[in-house]
Amino acid sequence: MSFVAASFVVFLIQERESRSKHLQFVSGLKFFVFWIANYVIDILCYIISCVPVVLVILIFQVDDFMSFEMMSYFIILLLVYGASTIPFMRSEEHTSELQSHH
């Protein structure tokens, strides 16, 4: 699932290069609303990408995950991982040295 979390950085870099965040703030969007909306969208995208992982485990009936208890622990682990990784990726967006080729 790390590749899914890392994929959020691509959008952050494009956002920084196009300065769309700055444009939204200049237009009057509140800082808090911007970050909450982005976080909710990122979490929803992450959850959508977690569903196939859980389905594959269920379809192939992986023995280690077939109990309700273990599957619920796995789903909680996926959700906590996503909830903690997405803000980390947001905080690391400024460390990228990629430059726009305009």
Image (cartoon, grey):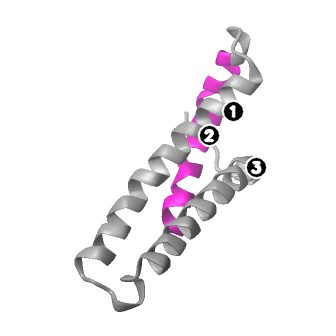
Residue at 32% in and 63% down = 52
Real-space Cα distance between discs 1 and 3? 12 Å
Q: Quadrant of residue 38?
A: top right
Q: Regarding mark 2 in the picture, which secondary structure is present there?
A: helix
Left or right, 4 with respect to 17, comes to left
Principal SS element in the magenta part? helix
Which residue is the site of mark 3? Answer: 91
User: Could you tell me the amino acid type at mark 2?
Assistant: Tyr
Which residue is the site of mark 2? Answer: 39
Left or right, 38 with respect to 90, comes to left
Real-space Cα distance between discs 2 and 3? 12 Å
Q: Quadrant of residue 67?
A: bottom left
> Are circles 2 and 1 on residues that touch, CB within 8 Å?
yes
How crowded is the residue under tag 2: few (<14 C-alpha within 10 Å), some, or many (20+)? some
Nearer the observer, disc 1 or disc 3?
1
Q: Nearer the viewer, residue 31 or 70?
A: 70
Nearer the observer, disc 2 or disc 3?
2
**Residue 57 on image: x %, y %:** 33, 77
